Amino acid sequence: MPGDGEIEVVPERLFGGLGVCALGLVMGLVIFAQLKNLPVHQAMKDISELIYETCKTYLFTQLKFIGYLWVFISAVMLAYYGWFIKFPVWKLGLILFFSLVGIAGSCFVAWFGIRVNTFANSRTAFASLEGKGYGVYSIPLRAGMSIGMLLISVELFLMLSIMLFVPDAAGPCFIGFAIGESLGASALRIAGGIFTKIADIGS
């Protein structure tokens, strides 16, 4: 029985949570494929692909910037948790490793959002030529569902995996994951979201 303030971890429930996350990932990817296969005018498609390539270049540029920031933040983490908190070396290694996992998760979701948005905008513009409202609101809605499901599924999958496979070191893992995820999100999603708005104008 857990003591006061402790959380009881039930492996069966965690495995069930991983299954739900997997279903969310599948749903996001299925909607992604459906959007990609929707009819679109070739000129609109060319514009959206050009915008995607521009956004992808931006993404790679930001990755270099994040790498420099990670080196600086890693030094701060090592100094704080190693010198002041007195974490052992293996815990420091976990913090650094899962900070990279968090950054990778942010980068993947940012790329996915850029790709889905550039698909959806050109398809929405083409659907509007029919003069009917359904496609104009349903395609962006499905794009948002795809990105949202993939985002929450990836984040929860990683967090549940930490609790399930490294329960004795979950604290340091969550610290590193939260730092890396926040670093990636601040550098990628905000500006990345602004970049994809160009697709509206282009469409």
Image: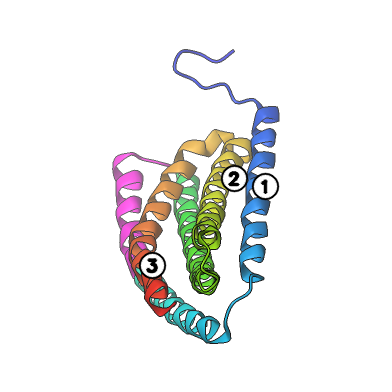
Place residue 161 in its image quadrant.
top right
Residue kind at label 1, given as amino acid type: Ala
Using the image, determine if residue 200 lies above or below residue 150: below
Residue kind at label 3, given as amino acid type: Gly
Residue 39 in percent (x, y) is at: 63, 74
- Dot 3 surroundings within 10 Å: few (below 14), some, or many (20 or more)? many
- Tag shown at residue 134: none
Which residue appears at 49% of the width and 44% of the height? Answer: 173
Q: Which residue, given by chain and number where applicable, does mark 3 sit on?
A: 192
Kindly report the distance in space between the C-alpha atoms of the residues bearing marks 2 and 1.
8 Å
52, 141: nearer the viewer: 141
Residue 93 in percent (x, y) is at: 48, 52
Q: Which residue, given by chain and number where applicable, does mark 2 sit on?
A: 157
Which residue appears at 68% of the width and 46% of the height? Answer: 23
Place residue 193 in its image quadrant.
bottom left
Which residue appears at 54% of the width and 42% of the height? Answer: 159
N-terminal of the two: label 2 or label 1?
A: 1
Using the image, determine if residue 78 lies above or below residue 33: above
Quadrant into which the N terminus falls: top right
125, 98: nearer the viewer: 125
Residue 61 in percent (x, y) is at: 39, 77
Q: Is residue 177 left or right of residue 146?
A: left
Residues drawn in magenta: 67-87
Residue kind at label 2, given as amino acid type: Phe
Circle 1 sits in a helix, a strand or a loop, which is it? helix
Kindly report the distance in space between the C-alpha atoms of the residues bearing marks 1 and 3.
25 Å
* C-beta proximity under 8 Å, tags 2 and 1: yes
N-terminal of the two: label 2 or label 3?
A: 2
